[in-house]
Image (cartoon, rainbow, N blue to C red):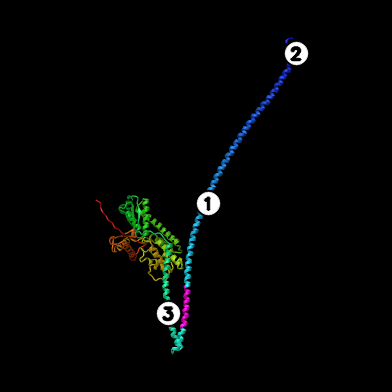
């Protein structure tokens, strides 16, 4: 069989075979497609899962970050709130402690007042008992006198040829004499007891007033100093041929001292207001640097206005401090001038306020009007504000000013009579005098002048050196101590103590001084030998 014949015979078979191959390929392709799709789906699924897992992790990380941030903010807020709470708690505790201290002080004051009231009640009860006993004694004496009169009357009727009227007259005369004698004795005893009580009560009132008030003081001065940066400025202050300093002295009414003292110019004047104006004006001129006559007059006028305004403010402040109202504007200004006035180193305005308080306390202890006493004390030295301008003493000047500006009679009399110059009509005058003496004489209130200070030191040394056996005496510690050297060979230890006691007693008797003076007596044996 030929090849073509073979092909012709096998053609149907080849077609089927090819069809089978094609189907097989199609099936395989379909399976392969499904397999590939399955693989792709798995990969996509894995990618999606990984992406989802990554997103979940990112969300978890973000949630963790948010939670950490929230926790940090919450912790910060907690710490802040805790700190605020601690601060508020500490403040509340501090306020509570302050309140406790204030209450403790108030309790102490209440206890003191209660003790004082109890003491007064005990003294009143004692006085009442004494009065009751005295009344009982008087009743008993009256009964005895009646019995004695009856007995004498019967005896006289029996033994004397007198009528009843004559006997009665004689008995009454004798009884009257007896009663007068006993009354005189009772009055004398009561006067002595009253003097003791008055002295003790006055000491208590004065001591209480001194303890309840104390104030600072300044030194007396009639000059003021102004600092200057360089000596060249001194020449500018003096000016060409002295024209600046002459213009300044003419405008201010003070003396300007420019000497060799480095960095200082001295302003001297008796009137404290003018001196203060001059001091402030000179400081302004030095600070400004423009110093010539017209500028000097301008600055002095400006400073004068400022000082006048300050004087009024000081007067108003003094009225507020002393709690005094309704004072005339002129008296208020004069009160302010007292701030620049001193007496024995004591600032007169401070002294006046102090006297006002002391007078009020004394008046309160005596059951008087404290407001009137305070007003009298504040204005008692008002005359010192113008005593260098008006002729006469400050009491008379102060009384005239108070009368001129509408003050009442007690205030006028206190200003005029607080040194005992007039007859006293109002009780407030001696109260102000006592308060004035307390303020002026208590330790540290006033400063002695140099001359009196030296005289006191010399007197101390003179008194100590006058005793037998004293070799040397030295006043030291500004007169607060006397150191005495005695002859050790002639004065023994027992006699040394007696000499120190006698010196102290003589100082107390012959001298007046604030505080106390210590007497130190030194007895020393010293032997010196040389080894050669």
Residue 432 coordinates in the image, percent (x, y): 41, 66
Q: Earlier in the sequence, mark 1 or mark 3?
A: 1
Label 1: state its secondary structure.
Answer: helix
Q: Which-is-in-front pick, marks 2 and 3?
A: 3
Q: Position of residue 441 (x, y in %)?
A: 38, 63
Q: Residues within 10 Å of mark 1 (few under 14, many from 20)?
A: few
- Quick check: 336 left or right of 231? right
Residue on which disc 1 sits: 89
In front of the other: 17 or 125: 125
SS at badge 3: helix
If you read the primary sequence from the N terminus, does the residue marked by circle 1 or circle 2 appear first? Answer: 2
Q: Main secondary structure of the magenta part?
A: helix
Q: Which quadrant would the N terminus be assigned to in this image?
A: top right
Between residue 286 and residue 124, name the one nearer to us. Answer: 124
Question: Residue 132 magenta-drawn?
Answer: yes
Checking the image for residue 9, the label placed there is 2
- Residue 119 spot, x, y in % from top left: 47, 67
Q: Which residue reaches farthest left?
A: 532
Q: In the displayed structure, would residue 341 be above or below residue 194? A: above
Measured Cα–Cα span from mark 1 to mark 2: 117 Å
What residue is pinned by disc 3? 180
Q: Please give left or right for residue 324 compared with residue 229 in the image.
A: right
Residue 47 as seen in the image, left or right of residue 442? right
């Amino acid at each position: 069989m030929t090849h073509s014949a073979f092909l012709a015979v096998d053609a149907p078979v080849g077609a089927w075979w090819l069809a089978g191959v094609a189907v097989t390929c199609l099936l395989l392709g379909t399976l392969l497609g499904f397999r590939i799709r399955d693989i792709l789906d798995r990969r996509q699924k894995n990618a999606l899962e990984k992406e989802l897992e990554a997103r979940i992790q990112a969300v978890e990380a973000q949630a963790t970050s948010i939670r950490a941030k929230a926790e940090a903010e919450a912790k910060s807020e907690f710490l802040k709130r805790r700190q605020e709470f601690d601060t508020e708690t500490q403040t509340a505790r501090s306020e509570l402690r302050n309140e406790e201290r204030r209450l403790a002080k108030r309790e102490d004051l209440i206890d003191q007042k209660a003790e004082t009231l109890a003491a007064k009640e005990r003294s009143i009860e004692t006085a009442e008992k004494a009065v009751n006993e005295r009344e009982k004694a008087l009743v008993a004496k009256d009964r005895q006198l009646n019995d004695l009169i009856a007995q004498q009357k019967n005896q006289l009727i029996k033994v004397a040829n007198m009528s009843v009227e004559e006997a009665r007259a004689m008995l009454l005369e004798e009884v009257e004499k007896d009663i007068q004698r006993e009354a005189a004795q009772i009055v004398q005893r009561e006067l002595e007891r009253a003097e003791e009580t008055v002295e003790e009560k006055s000491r208590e009132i004065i001591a209480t007033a001194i303890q309840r008030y104390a104030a600072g003081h300044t030194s007396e001065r009639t000059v003021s100093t102004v600092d200057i940066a360089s000596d060249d400025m001194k020449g500018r202050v003096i000016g060409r041929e002295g024209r600046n300093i002459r213009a300044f002295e003419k405008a201010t009414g003070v003396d300007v001292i420019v000497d060799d003292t480095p960095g200082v110019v001295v302003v001297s004047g008796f009137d404290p207001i003018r001196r203060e104006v001059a001091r402030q004006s000179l400081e302004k001129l030095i600070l400004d640097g423009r110093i010539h006559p017209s500028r000097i007059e301008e600055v002095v006028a400006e400073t004068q206005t400022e000082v006048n305004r300050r004087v009024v403010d000081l007067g108003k402040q003094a009225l507020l401090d002393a709690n005094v109202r309704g004072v005339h504007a002129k008296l208020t200004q004069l009160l302010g001038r007292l701030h620049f006035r001193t007496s024995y180193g004591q600032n007169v305005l401070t002294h006046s306020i102090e006297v006002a308080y002391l007078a009020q306390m004394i008046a309160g202890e005596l059951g008087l009007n404290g407001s009137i006493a305070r007003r009298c004390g504040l204005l008692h030295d008002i005359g010192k504000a113008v005593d260098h301008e008006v002729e006469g003493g400050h009491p008379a000047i102060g009384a005239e000013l108070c009368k001129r500006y509408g003050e009442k009679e007690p205030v006028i009399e206190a200003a005029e009579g607080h040194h005992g110059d007039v007859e006293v009509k109002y009780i407030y005058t001696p109260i102000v005098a006592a308060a004035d003496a307390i303020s002026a004489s208590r330790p540290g209130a006033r400063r002695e002048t140099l001359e009196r200070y030296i005289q006191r030191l010399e007197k101390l040394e003179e008194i100590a050196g006058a005793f037998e056996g004293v070799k040397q005496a030295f006043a030291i510690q500004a007169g607060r101590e006397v150191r005495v050297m005695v002859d050790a060979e002639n004065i023994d230890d027992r006699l040394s103590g007696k000499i120190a006691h006698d010196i102290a007693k003589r100082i107390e008797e012959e001298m007046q001084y604030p505080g106390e003076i210590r007497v130190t007596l030194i007895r020393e044996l010293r032997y010196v030998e040389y080894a050669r």
